[in-house]
Amino acid sequence: MTGLPLIALVGNPNAGKSALFNALTGARQKLGNYPGVTVERKAGRFSLSDGRPIELVDLPGTYSLNPASPDEQVTRDVILGKQAGERLPDALVVVVDASNLDNHLRFALELIALGLPTIVALNMVDLATRDGLELDANILSRELGVPVISTVAVRKRGLDHLRSELESMLDGSAGRVRPTGEQPDFEGLRKEARRIARAAVVRETPSRRMTAAVDRVLLHPVAGFLILLALLFVMFQAVFSWAAAPADLLEGWVTALGETITATLPPGILHDFLLQGVIGGVGAVVVFLPQILILFFFILMLEATGYMARAAFLMDALMARVGLSGRAFIPLLSSFACAVPGIMATRTISDPKDRLTTILIAPLMTCSARLPVYGLIIAAFIPARSVGPGVGLQGLVLFLLYVAGIVGAMVAAWALRLTVTKGQSGGFLMEMPKYQWPRPQDIAIGLWQRAVIFLKRAGTIILMTNIILWVLASFPQAPAGVRQSEYSIAGRIAGGIHVLVEPIGFNRDISLALLPSMAAREVAVSAIATVYAIDAGDDEDALNRTLGERLQGRWSLATALAFLAWFVFAPQCISTIAVTRRETNGWKWPMFMMGYLFALAYAAAGITYWAAVSAGLG
């Protein structure tokens, strides 16, 4: 510890604190950890205009003095003089982003209220000017009651003025009081921050005013939520209507490839393996590539335009009602693509109970791997008819399946937070990105990457699983008059599973597909296609029928609906289970997750099946 005056650099994340710290201290920096915690301590020295040396500490970014992580706890304790090995700062330099002033001023007001000598660094004023916003630092200083210095840290602009102001402040700070850290009125501070930010605006372009007007609608708790639901509804309508032509084209290519193999190779094991195990199985999944790309096109567009952060803001209030922090939204959103990166993204959640709850419900988010299953069953059993202007029944059913997953996740989170992960959840603050036009090349690259991932998965996990299934389903050879899929090794395994799932309406075809689909959800489609291809043998009429047409002849509508309900909840993905074990450091929570999700899936499928049978759909 030195006898030099100590200045604490504090502010929201992304305010430019580190850039200002580097500009002031240059190479005179040292890194280490705070005593007792593994949080980085970044300190350095710089000189005032009179040559006096000053010690500067760059505190972790935070949105308030109500900590939600070890980093934020350190910031609070240093400012209040409670951090072990740290003394109370002689002054605070609060760094705020000029282009996002109302959000940053809320924390600045909370810090000013502590009573410590404070200077506000109005940083990144060049970017604010570029975006059409001009602010008056003098008005801001008058409203806040502390000096305000305009800075551009990356260009070292305003640093001399900041040094001079610090010199004057330190010369007159002998009578300062120790802050108490009493809980402030957050809502009152937010309103005051907005008022001061508006008062400081000298000039604002129409585009910024338009953004504010749009946000008033899109972020409205009622209108904004209805708009979000409408966007999701349109997205799922498009998944079916837009994908019809390219899916038919892909299915034609798969059929042509099968015909080429039939014409080229003589009957035998190799012919059957390629036609039934490879083309019949993997091809049945590949035809759903257009639907997956259309889904991701909408997701990428919503992210690129800046709307996705607004959706997170809207969902935060709903998630708080079930005991989850708004920090859980991004991991859950990632789980719509795949639960694996979604579960890994929970590392950003500081509260261990919040994080565990998010991990346990992430598989309930309807990942893209479910789409081939949903697409197959909906296309086979739900009529492609309109139920209103521009509203297709198939798209409506898909939308309801996604809603069922979200509702199931929220109910599960509520139940978990009341029982095994009981605890208090905290809110979070977030910054809204600017609205912007998406770059076509970015969207194209994103879709290309998703297509590569899907095809690579089809060529590895799905292909290998299908090869194993084809071998188990092809041997031993069934005698005449007996279905090969029932007589084979796979059929006998399925017979044992069928005893368990027959009460919920599942037939032997589904029983056979459940076990291999544990490798990946899409395998359920390829497994059923492979088994049907084996049963068809050399029957040209059966081979020429689509998978959906074969399902219609062997499944009841009640069974099909029960199968959809099962896949809304069932955690059928080995990768998800493995990453859960890694992120929770053991098998306790993965086994718990599998148990409660399979129980939910079993109950949902059974209720759906018997309700459909009672309605005459069995």
Image (spheres, rainbow, N blue to C red):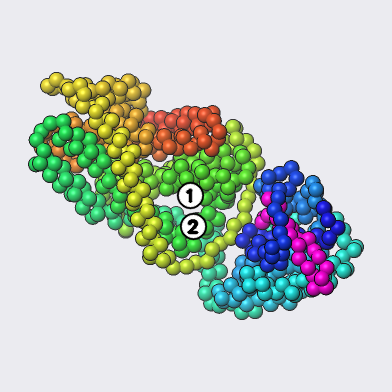
Q: Residue furthest front?
A: 27
Q: Is residue 66 visible?
A: no
Disc 2 residue crowd, few under 14, some 14–19, many 20+, Cα 10 Å: many
Tell me how far mark 2 sits from mark 1, CA to CA: 9 Å
Residue 122 is inside the magenta segment: no
Residue 50 is inside the magenta segment: yes
Question: Which mark identifies residue 308?
Answer: 2
Judged from the image, the secondary structure of the residue bearing numbered disc 1 is helix
Q: In this picture, is 186 found above or below 552? A: below
Q: Quadrant of the C terminus?
A: top left
Residue type beneath disc 2: Met
Residue type beneath disc 1: Leu
Please identify the quarter of the rendering in which residue 418 is found.
top right
| Residue at (80% x, 60% y) in the render | 6
| Residue at (78% x, 65% y) in the render | 118
User: Which residue is at the front of the view, 316 or 603?
Assistant: 316
Relative placement, left or right, of 521 versus 432 is left
Q: Which residue has dot 1 on it?
A: 333
Identify the magenta region: 40-66
Residue 562 position, x and y percent, is 34, 34
Q: Is residue 271 visible?
A: yes
Question: Which mark identifies residue 78?
Answer: none
User: Which residue is at the front of the view, 463 or 523?
Assistant: 463
